[in-house]
Image (cartoon, rainbow, N blue to C red):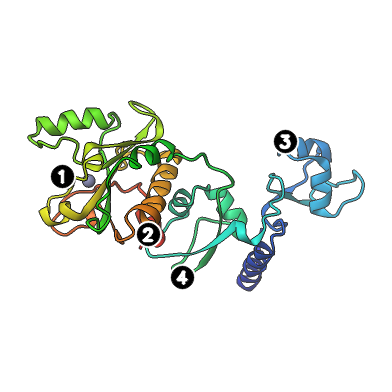
Amino acid sequence: MKCTRRDFARRLSLGAATGLLGLPFMASGISYTVKKGDTLGRIARRHDLSAEQLRRANQITGDLIRVGQKLHLPVNKTPRATPRSMHRVHVVQRGDTLSGIAQANRTTVSELKAANNLYSDLIRIGQPLLVPTAISAADLLTSVRAINSRVQVRANNWKGIVVHHSAIKNGNAAIYDKNHRRKGMQNGLAYHFVIGNGIDSGDGEIEIGRRWTHQLQGGHVKNHTINLTAIGICLIGNFQETRPSKLQIEAFTQLMDWLRSDVVPKAKQFAGHRELRGEQTVCPGKNFPLAAMHSRYG
Ligand SMILES: [Zn+2]
């Protein structure tokens, strides 16, 4: 669809305004030029739409279409009659990408685009984006809460949280515990929490290490002082090569939200492993949505 820059900007702001009012986005979609032999029904079927949806999107009443006519194909989804409270606003930060923001907020790039009437992946720093909030996600913290209720948390001790990837696709808390002991760490598993990817533990399963149940210092970063006060959360996988699964991100954000609000409110600092001074690592990998997590967790 061709339009001037001004039209485009106007459409964007109209889209955003519509979103705030919770109306479905009529402007999102693609355009289609009618070809010889096309019928409304056939075009609709081919694009996973109903003829009625096509009529409505193009203000057509009957079945008559002509070759060369441009039709607007709406994005097929049940109209999101999303009330304002179902969106939150994310202001684009340096390093943000649509896929990173989508991941961090448990949504998808196409949902983000639809919610903001974006026609490309281009976003700019400072741009406010409407982020649809997850409709209903399973509570991945049930067992974590149960185990934690028996832990005497040294709430004042923990000042920060560092996120890691395991840099290999296999493993679970027990396997890493063995590896770390073999490497000479007498407290075993260097992290406090491990989030599975469905290979050697459940996808999005949160395992609690002994360093958490016994409130021991971490062994997950080089700096001893940081290890004393920083909780280590490790997502299994090599995120230089693959992406964390949706459930892993879901588990990570649930764990972070819960830790920060209910368990260790003083753990205000948040970092990816590679951001710590003196570290020479890519951890948690380039595909971990670190920028988006920073905009959520500071
Ligand atoms: Zn790391």
- Residue 297: image tag: 2
Relative depth, front residue between 297 and 73: 297
Q: Are marks 4 and 2 in contact (CB under 8 Å)?
A: no
Disc 1 vs disc 3: which is toward the camera? 1
The span from disc 4 to disc 2 (Cα, nearest Å) is 17 Å
Query: In screen coordinates, is 9 left or right of 63?
Result: left
Q: Secondary structure at mark 4?
A: loop
Asked if residue 118 shows in the view, the reply is no
Q: Amino acid at mark 1?
A: Gly
The span from disc 3 to disc 4 (Cα, nearest Å) is 38 Å
Asked if residue 285 shows in the view, the reply is yes
Q: Could you tell which of marks 4 and 2 lies nearer the N-terminus?
A: 4
Q: Are marks 1 and 4 in contact (CB under 8 Å)?
A: no
Relative depth, front residue between 159 and 245: 159
Q: Amino acid at mark 4?
A: Gly
The span from disc 3 to disc 2 (Cα, nearest Å) is 43 Å
Other-residue count near label 1 (Cα within 10 Å), few / some / many at <14 / 14–19 / ≥20: many
Report which residue position mark 1 lands on: 219
Q: Residue at x 45, y 48 (%)?
A: 103
